[in-house]
Every structure is written in C-alpha cells, then in structure tokens.
Image (cartoon, coloured by chain):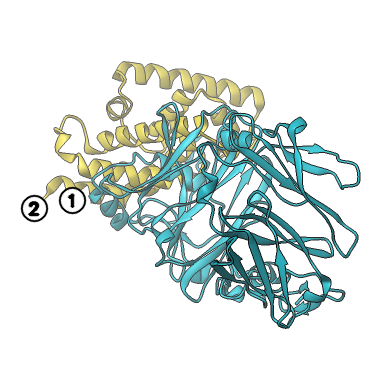
C-alpha cells in the first residue's frame, strides 16, 4: 500500500481553534481533571450556545445567548404577576435567554434563564422544573439549589436539577448511599446571572443519592447539600383514595387507621361543597388528619404542644374559600376579622379548625385581613395578619386579564 | 529558560490540527478531540520533567494524548447517561468511500494507520506513543495495509 491510498483529505478538518493560552490555564490547575467530566459536559450540552471552556466547564455568555420567544417571556412574566404581594421575584421576563439543553428519555429539556432586579435569576427547564433564586444575598444563596424529579427507579429519583451561585465551584459531584461519587456536568452562565446550572440523570439502578457537593479548584468542599430520602418521604406522605357518603372522593393518609376515624367538622360551603375534617390514629404513633383539600400525618416525634397558635391558612376549593387546619394548645377561640369591619367567632376542636368563609368576604375590600387567638379566659394569645391583595386566591365570577397573558381573579 | 516548555508550545502550534483530527477518530468529534488535545498538552506541560529524552517529545505527547482520548472514550461510553446513543463516528456520513474502509479497521489498527499516515510518525515514534514494540507496529501496519488493499479491491471504493 502506498501513502497515496490515505491522502490527508480523508480526515475531515476541524475549525482553526488552537489556543495555547488555554493549555497554559489548564496546566496551572493543580488538580488535573483528566478531561473526563469536562468532555461529558461538552457532550451533554447542546451545540449552539455561545460558550467557552476557560475553566474546564462550558461558560455561556448570557449576553450572546438566544432571546426567549413570547411564550417563554410570558412564562417568566406570570411568576411576577401571580406572586403574592412582597413575594414577586422581580424577574425581568424580556431578558429571558436560552442557556442550554439536554435530552433525557427522548425529551429535550431547554433551560431558559431570566435575571431578577435583585441580582438573582429565575430558571425554567421546559417539560420539567422551574423556580427563582431572586436574591443572591439571602441565607439560601450559600446552598446548592436541588430539585429532585421522582421516577420509577431504584432510588425513586429520575433526575437532579438545580443551580448554584458559588463562583469558586469548579467541580460538582453527586454522592450515593454506597459511597460512590460521580461528577455532574454543569454550565456556568455569565453576568448578570453569574451562576452554574446542571441537569443530572440518576441512573435507573443507582442507589439513593445522598448529597450534591461542590468543590473548588483545590478540591476543597465549597458547599455540601444533603438530599432527603424521597422514598421514605413518599412512604410517609403516601395517600389513598377513600369515599365517605355525601362527600367528594377524599385523599387520606395511608398511615391513618381508617376504621378509627372521627369527624371533627362538617361544613357546607356557599357553593354547595360539603367539607369535612377527620382525624385518626397514625400507624406508628401520632395522629393523621384530612379534609377535602389537605391531609397529613405528623413526623415521628412531633409534639402537638409545640404547634404555633394560628397554624391556619386559606384553602381554595373550586368556587369557595375555607380556613383550615390547626391551632396551638390552649386556643379556645379564634376571631376572624375582615377589611369591612365584620368579625366571626370560630371554635377549634382538639387543636383543629375548619371554616367556610362566606362569599360576601371574597371581593377586595371585604376580605379576611386578621386572625386573633384567645384562650378560654379570653386572653389574647396571638394575632396574624393576612394579605388581602394577592391575586388569584379568592374565587370570582369574572377573572381579569393581566400582562403576560395571565388571567385570574383580582 | 524552559526548553521543554518552549518545545511543547512549538509542537502545539505546528501540530495542533493533526493531533485534533487524528484524535477525533478515537473520541468521535472534533469538539471532544479539541478538549483531549488541550488537556493532553496541559498534562504534558505539568509533567514535562518526566520526559527523559528517550524518543521524541512528539511521540511522548502522542502517548499522553492517546491515553487521554482512550480514557475519555471509555468513560463516555460507560457514563453516557442523558443520551443513550453512543458518541457519533466522525466519518459516519461516508459509507462508500475510503473513509468507510478506514472505519472498518479495528480501532487499534486504525489508530496506528492514523499515526503513521496522518501524523507522519515513524515506526519508532508510534511504538513509543502506543507503548508497543516497534516490530509489532510494523507487523500491524503491514496487516492493516493488506486489509485495506483487499477492502478497496473488493468494494471498489471511491478515493
């Protein structure tokens, strides 16, 4: 065979992308990564984003990334419009950009990120999870954000998805219950986002992931985020469908001793809904409760005497609104106070309370704005204010249109 | 003055594309091959004191690069978690030409062919780069030549 049989043209030429300075940077890094996880990251991150590899993981230049289409802008905008007063993330929806994408089980998940006014960001993985880290200076900013996507796997987990602010992070790792550890590919997104993002598929037969760990260039742990046992959590919170004559189907804690149930409240809402609150001993100790919209069993060791005086919240159900579910020990009476000066006296039973709010108190100007707890002697134990301007909470006949194609009750 | 460092930079600047294009045949794409080359030269820089002048500097770097590429390919296949498909072959689009014939060679033999005819390494340098005896290189290449000749004659491939 002659040399002419193998002309140089046989090897398709790649782009002129030599970079000696990059070699020098890599050489300066004390812990050689062997290229493996870098390459995995490269392999898993879709081509087409403006990226560089200055530090061994892809860096996405946010300013050059593809802008979000209207649908994405509206998705981020709805976070702002629909948030309760004081809880809006301050997201800038029109700044949303495409950061990267991964494929899992035949589905492409695209990561869209938009900055917030406070220096944080909101993230949205299509067909998956989303959320906001509005402020990079709060306590949570020192944590690694982890969303756990459940699935029919040995560990009960299908994927770990999240982000982190720590710019010192050079290597991200998941540790498993058997002591093994594997690198998680991630991308770093430049200002104004300045955060790392990852989407890691948990292998089907992997043991339980126990933590996500971020290391700096020297191999020192920057942050370690322990992961709960989702199978244990799921077992504890598992619910079963039950029927009780006269009520819509109920989701009842599987741990509740069904035959020993007792009904504490029986309420008819103005829209015709029949509401109830039941309790039953929990297998393994403690007590479970359930209503038409809520259910739960206290965790092992929970002491009901430590309940706060007013562990009550609004429960929306179709066209009615209820107040539910717990009060602290010693609370004999709860006074519901409304914007229009109206008041209602409520009597808890065994530290539980369920009350259907009358429809006249749904419109703005008439809503519940305060609750006060009293003991049997009439002494005030605690008070709690309620926001009355949160959109989308109370039912209404005619929802209003808001920016970003959001439609909801005022 | 750091002679090895200067020599490595010179080698990189002169031979980068050859390294990358040959290694693409191992790891499956130019993007991945670029990472291998960058890491391989970075590793060579860090460990240049280990090169004792036995054989050429280029052969020593090739050995490092091939090891990085093979390890990468192995790990990619083992841990390809988000995409079930294996990494793409760089020549996959050419089923009826010489590239396809080259692709049909066993990977080890194909690597030697690449190193000989694309990287222009001598038998001695290939032996050093791949950690096999020089005689084995010669025998393997002769075998590869024969296989390629037979394939070309049988398939009548384009050149």
Q: Quick one: which residue is furthest to the front in this view?
A: A377
How many residues crowd around disc 1 within 10 Å: few (fewer than 14), some, or many (20 or more)?
Answer: few
The chain letter for the residue carrying disc 2 is: B
Task: Check disc 1 and report its element: helix, strand or loop.
Answer: helix
Of the pair A7 and A17, the residue shown nearer to us: A17
Residue that appears at 47% across and 60% down: A51
Distance between the alpha carbons at the discs numbered 2 and 1? 9 Å
The chain letter for the residue carrying disc 1 is: B
Query: What x and y, as percent, mark residue A293?
Result: 75, 52
Please give the label number shown on residue A15.
Answer: none
A131, above or below B64, in the image? below
> Quick one: label 2 or label 1, which is nearer the N terminus?
2
A121, above or below A52, in the image? below
- Reading the image, the residue beneath label 2 is B1
Query: What x and y, as percent, mark residue A156?
Result: 60, 34
- Reading the image, the residue beneath label 1 is B6
Q: Residue A140's image quarter?
A: bottom left
Q: Colour of chain B?
A: yellow
Can residue B149 be seen here? The reply is yes
Which chain identifier belongs to the cyan chain? A
Can residue B30 be seen here? The reply is no
Residue that appears at 57% across and 69% down: A384
Task: Check disc 2 and report its element: helix, strand or loop.
Answer: loop
Residue that appears at 35% across and 54% down: A55
Query: What x and y, as percent, mark residue A273?
Result: 87, 57
Badge 2 vs badge 1, beta-carbon distance below 8 Å: yes
Q: Quadrant of the C terminus of chain B?
A: top right
Of the pair A352 and B92, the residue shown nearer to us: A352
How many residues crowd around disc 2 within 10 Å: few (fewer than 14), some, or many (20 or more)?
Answer: few
């Amino acid at each position: 065979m002659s040399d002419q049989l193998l002309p140089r043209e046989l090897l398709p030429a790649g782009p002129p992308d030599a970079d000696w300075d990059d070699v020098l940077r890599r050489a300066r890094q004390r812990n050689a990564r062997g290229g493996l996880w870098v390459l995995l990251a490269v392999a898993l991150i879709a081509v087409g984003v403006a990226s560089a590899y200055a530090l061994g993981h892809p860096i996405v230049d946010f300013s050059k990334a593809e802008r979000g289409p209207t649908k994405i802008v509206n998705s981020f905008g709805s976070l702002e419009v629909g948030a309760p007063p004081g809880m809006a993330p301050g997201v800038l929806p029109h700044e949303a950009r495409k950061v990267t994408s991964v494929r899992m089980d035949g589905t492409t998940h695209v990561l869209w990120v938009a900055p917030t006014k406070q220096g944080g960001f909101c993230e949205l993985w299509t067909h998956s999870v989303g959320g906001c880290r509005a402020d990079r200076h709060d306590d949570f900013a020192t944590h690694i954000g982890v969303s756990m996507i459940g699935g029919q796997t040995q560990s009960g987990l299908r994927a770990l998805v999240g982000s982190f602010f720590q710019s010192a992070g050079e290597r991200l790792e998941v540790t498993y219950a058997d002591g093994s550890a594997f690198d998680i590919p991630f991308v770093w997104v430049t200002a104004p986002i300045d955060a790392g993002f990852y989407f890691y598929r948990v292998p089907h037969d992997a043991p339980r992931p126990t933590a996500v760990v971020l290391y700096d260039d020297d191999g020192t742990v920057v942050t370690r985020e322990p992961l709960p046992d989702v199978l244990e959590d799921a077992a504890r919170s598992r619910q079963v469908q039950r029927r009780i004559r006269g009520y819509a189907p109920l989701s009842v804690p599987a741990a509740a001793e069904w035959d020993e149930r007792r009904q504490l409240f029986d309420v008819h809402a103005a829209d015709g809904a029949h509401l109830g609150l039941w309790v039953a001993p929990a297998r393994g100790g403690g007590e479970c409760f359930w209503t038409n919209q809520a259910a739960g069993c206290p965790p092992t060791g929970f002491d009901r005497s430590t309940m706060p005086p007013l562990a009550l919240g609004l429960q929306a159900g179709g066209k009615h609104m209820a107040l539910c579910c717990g009060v602290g020990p010693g609370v004999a009476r709860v006074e519901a106070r409304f914007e229009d000066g109206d008041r209602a006296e409520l009597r808890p039973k065994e530290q539980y309370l369920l009350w259907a709010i009358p429809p006249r108190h749904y419109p703005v100007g008439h809503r519940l704005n305060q609750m006060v707890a009293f003991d049997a002697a009439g002494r005030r134990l605690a008070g709690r204010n309620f926001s009355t301007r949160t959109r989308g909470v109370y039912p209404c006949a005619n929802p209003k249109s808001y920016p970003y194609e959001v439609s909801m009750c005022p | 003055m750091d002679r090895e460092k200067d020599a490595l930079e010179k080698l990189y600047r002169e031979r980068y594309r050859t390294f990358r294009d040959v290694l693409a045949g191992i790891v499956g794409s130019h993007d991945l091959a670029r990472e291998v080359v960058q890491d391989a030269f970075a590793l060579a820089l860090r460990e240049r004191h280990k090169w004792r002048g036995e054989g050429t500097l280029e052969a020593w770097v090739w050995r490092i690069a091939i090891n990085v590429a093979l390890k990468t390919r192995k790990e990619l296949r083992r841990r390809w978690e988000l995409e079930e498909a294996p990494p793409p072959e760089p020549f996959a689009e050419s089923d009826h030409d010489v590239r396809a014939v080259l692709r049909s060679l066993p990977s080890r033999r194909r690597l030697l062919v690449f190193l000989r005819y694309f990287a222009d390494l001598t038998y001695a340098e290939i032996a050093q780069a791949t950690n096999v005896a020089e005689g084995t290189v010669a025998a393997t290449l002769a075998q590869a030549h024969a296989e390629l000749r037979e394939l070309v004659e049988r398939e009548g491939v384009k050149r």
